[in-house]
Image (cartoon, helix red, strand yellow):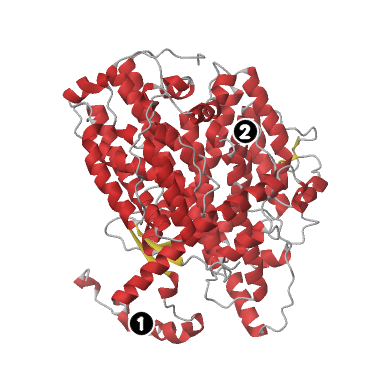
Amino acid sequence: MYTQALNASQSDELTGEDAAKISRFEARVAAEERIEANDWMPAAYRKTLTRQISQHAHSEIVGMLPEGNWLTRAPTLRRKAALLAKVQDECGHGLYLYAAAETLGTSREELVDQMLSGKAKYSSIFNYPTLTWADIGTIGWLVDGAAIMNQIPLCRCSYGPYARAMIRVCKEESFHQRQGYEIMVTLSRGTPEQKAMAQGALDRWWWPCLMMFGPPDQQSQHGDQSTRWKIKRFSNDDLRQKFIDATVPQARYLDLKIPDDNLRWNEATGHWDYGDIDWQEFNNVLAGNGPCNRDRLAARRKAHDEGAWVREAALAYAEKQKRKTTAAA
Amino acid sequence: MTVQNISLWEVFIRSRNGLAHKHVGSLHAADAALALRAARDIYTRRGEGLSIWVVPSNAIIASDPADKEMLFEPAMSKIYRHPTFYDVPDEVGHM
Amino acid sequence: MATAICIQNSALFMYVLGRADDALILGHRLSEWCGHAPMMEEDMALANMGLDLIGQARELYTYAAEVEGAGNDEDKFAYLRDVQHYRNVLLVERPNGDFAQTMMRQFFYSAFADCYWRAMMSSTDPTLAAIAAKSEKESAYHLRHSSEWIIRLGDGTDESHRRAQSALNDLWPFTGELFQANPEDDALFAGRIAVDPRGLLQPWTENVTAILRSARLTLPQSQWMQKGGRSGQHSEHLGHLLSELQSLQRTYPNATW
């Protein structure tokens, strides 16, 4: 899941690159041709994509942690198996995405280092804690729901390897949101305590989920170039609106209240109007001050550091085998 | 500390007998046996495959996209290689 | 769901329950790795093995419930029994430790499960035979995966060798219980409903020592074997595992999840 519109597109100087090559490239993109790994591409396109795909990959991997927090406490065996399969899928999606990013010339190791050192970002949503079982339902329902809105257009991204990875991700992800919503249906039909648990989770996750679509269009530094390059196909606000419109009736079915007193159906626009998003909170979480930023990075660093001897062992064994084969030849 | 990177492998899956192996993505593994195992765990979780190939990524020799015109355009003009180039009278029927 | 369930005591029921407990506890342990493995490729593999085992546990619990006929189900068995009612071998409740400990535990268990389930495919009990047919394929893969890692860890670097050897020394005493037969199981063996695990010791030992030899690892001298899990005498670790596993069901009795 989980790309987040948070990359500030850097308007690299295009001078120095062959203007004819650039215009040929842009014509191909405009004609909806896919760009493949070996094709010539402007340095800024490569850089923007490497950053976006790797951030997306980091988000999948860090995203395993909040849900992983409930794997050992899932309340039935059916839920336990579904959650383990889902969190594992996220790992798989991270893998597909690192593989796509690597085709642009930066190794996975380098990309992971950028994340572990805090230099590269990942989706802000994973810096919030999962406090009750209802958070697992809510993440599937809302966080995956928001991610799907973001990701479906990426299946038509101009960069072939990214688009193919996203097709695979979207296909596999179709069960994630349903898994979450099913948990919410069960809780909202359950005991008063369970219903309160569900409402509490919605209260905590609603606004952070709306932030997943990135800053409002008038502030977004993104826009033009990514749109022209067909990396981005819809604006942050358009996707956010689409998400809200889809989610309101689902919340209503659960008989849960979305924590926004300004949420109103607008007959004229045919959309739901919503209240102001606290962008200060968003920027604060991005800056590293969310409730779990430190814990998430610490967990990833720990896994990386403690796994080093295993990776070294596998390499050492492969080296030895190679030497044996060469000696025998 | 610079640790050597674990090698990159390209993965090809045959989804059912009768079909060719198709490229599905890549992975990292220290050797061929681990690569095969990882390919199974990563790329066939939903019954996508009956057979797997893993190939070291650096063993693949690719054509240069800059040569695309030289390599592929000459074939475009040879329309006489295609059956529709030839007229067969309708009375003869399907051929 | 009630706060506790009463366990009926029939040989077949207790037998099936024990096998289900083995699979659940080991699957649970593997799920603890999710998101924390040494590399992403291995995160995928550990979760796959965990899912296979949880799947086996569910089928076995469901069959146990059918045999018992007391209206229990997989979740009641998993979530509403206390430590002393669990019948898994001690090996599977060992904590994950480092990757060498986890792989050694998996290797010992899978080497057993592989020959156990293959033999159980000819059980005269059709349900067990069907579960065996599915579980055997899964276990064969787990065995191959864990064997490959044992060889790489044992014959990798000095550090990985040291860790693998210490995992072997720590876990070896827990392997004997896999081959222990309870007196009440005799009728099941006689009716060829279940296989006598004592007969699996020799092939297991041959397989395991061959892999350990290629891994340049040495078997510990001591032949002392721990036991107790099959009769409900567990280590301290299981209680903590269950307190986590069962926390929601215990905190909110009678809720549906």
User: Are the residues tagged 1 and 2 within 8 Å (C-beta)?
Assistant: no
Quick one: which residue is furthest to the front in this view? Answer: C221
Q: Position of residue A101 (x, y in %)?
A: 57, 64
**Residue type indicated by callout 2:** Gln
C170 vs A226: above or below: above
Q: Position of residue A290 (x, y in %)?
A: 75, 45
Along the viewing direction, whichever of A86 and A14 lies nearer the viewer: A86
Q: Quadrant of the N terminus of chain B?
A: bottom right
Along the viewing direction, whichever of C187 and A61 lies nearer the viewer: C187
Calculate the distance from the C-alpha at mark 1 to the C-alpha at mark 2: 56 Å
**Residue designated by label 1:** B79
What's the residue at 79%, 51% (across, down)? A283
**Can residue C90 be spotted in the picture?**
yes
Could you tell me which secondary element the residue under label 1 belongs to? helix
Mark sitting on residue A84: none
What's the residue at 36%, 60% (across, down)? B33
What's the residue at 60%, 30% (across, down)? A133
Mark 1 belongs to which subunit? Answer: B
Q: Position of residue B30 (x, y in %)?
A: 44, 63
Mark 2 belongs to which subunit? Answer: A
Could you tell me which secondary element the residue under label 2 belongs to? helix
In front of the other: label 1 or label 2? 2
Along the viewing direction, whichever of B87 and C71 lies nearer the viewer: C71
**Residue designated by label 2:** A250
Q: Are marks 1 and 2 on the same chain?
A: no
Q: Position of residue C85 (x, y in %)?
A: 42, 20
**Can residue A232 be spotted in the picture?**
no
**Residue type indicated by callout 1:** Ile
What's the residue at 54%, 76% (across, down)? A39
